[in-house]
Amino acid sequence: MATKSLTRRERIHYRVRKIVEGTAVRPRLAVFRSSKEIYAQVIDDHSGKTICAASSLKLGVREVSGSKLEQALQVGIKIAELAKANGIESVSFDRGGFLYHGRVKSLAEGARKGGLNF
């Protein structure tokens, strides 16, 4: 019987997802960080729907001249604007198994600066 070997990030993500759950009242802010880009989604897990999403690939964020940290900050501000437009004030932060520093931390600070509570 073959078993799949999980990466460290996947193991951490499963451990975090046992606790963090998105509801209609307090959806989950999920973050994914690749080597070039950063993505954020606000998800209602009970209905299985993505409420809004933002990434460094979307127009307006990509043109930000500067480091990936500054791009992550802009993505955080953008996701907060989209969530506020959909009537969401508070979210549960799901760091996706990534450590809370660098670009993930910058995105979270941008979301807080944009007005989201978590």
Image: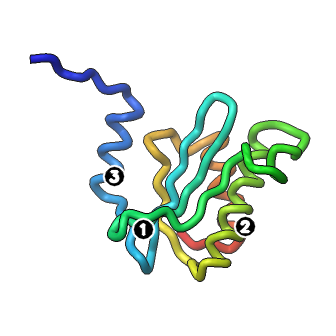
Q: Hey, which residue is sitting farthest left in the picture?
A: 1
Mark 3 residue element: helix
Mark 1 lies on a secondary structure that is: strand
Query: Element type at marker 2?
Result: helix
Bin the neighbour count of mark 1 within 10 Å (Cα to Cα): few under 14, some 14-19, many 20 and up: many
> Residue at position x 77%, y 54% from top?
74
Q: Give me the residue at 46% from left, 69% from top.
A: 27
In this image, 74 relative to 35: left or right? right
Q: Real-space Cα distance between discs 3 and 1?
A: 13 Å
Looking at numbered disc 2 in the image, what kind of residue is underneath it? Answer: Lys
Q: CA distance from mark 2 to mark 3?
A: 25 Å
- Location of residue 102 in the rendering, given as x and y in whole percent from the top left corner: 65, 40
Q: Which mark is drawn over residue 113? A: 2
Frontmost of labels 2 and 1 is 1
Q: Amino acid at mark 3?
A: Arg
Say which of marks 2 and 3 sits in front: 3
Which percent across, then down, holds residue 78?
73, 62
In the displayed structure, 105 sits above or below 117; it is above
Name the kind of residue labelled 1 in the image: Asp
Q: Which residue is mark 1?
A: 44
Question: Within 10 angstroms of label 3, few (less than 14), some, or many (20 or more) residues?
Answer: some
Rendered position, 39 above or below 112: above
The residue shown at (87%, 46%) is 64
Distance, label 2 to label 1, CA atoms, is 22 Å
Apparent side of residue 33 relative to residue 66 in the rendered image (left or right)? left
Q: Which mark is residue 17?
A: 3
Give coordinates of residue 49: x percent, y percent: 44, 64
Q: Earlier in the sequence, mark 2 or mark 1?
A: 1
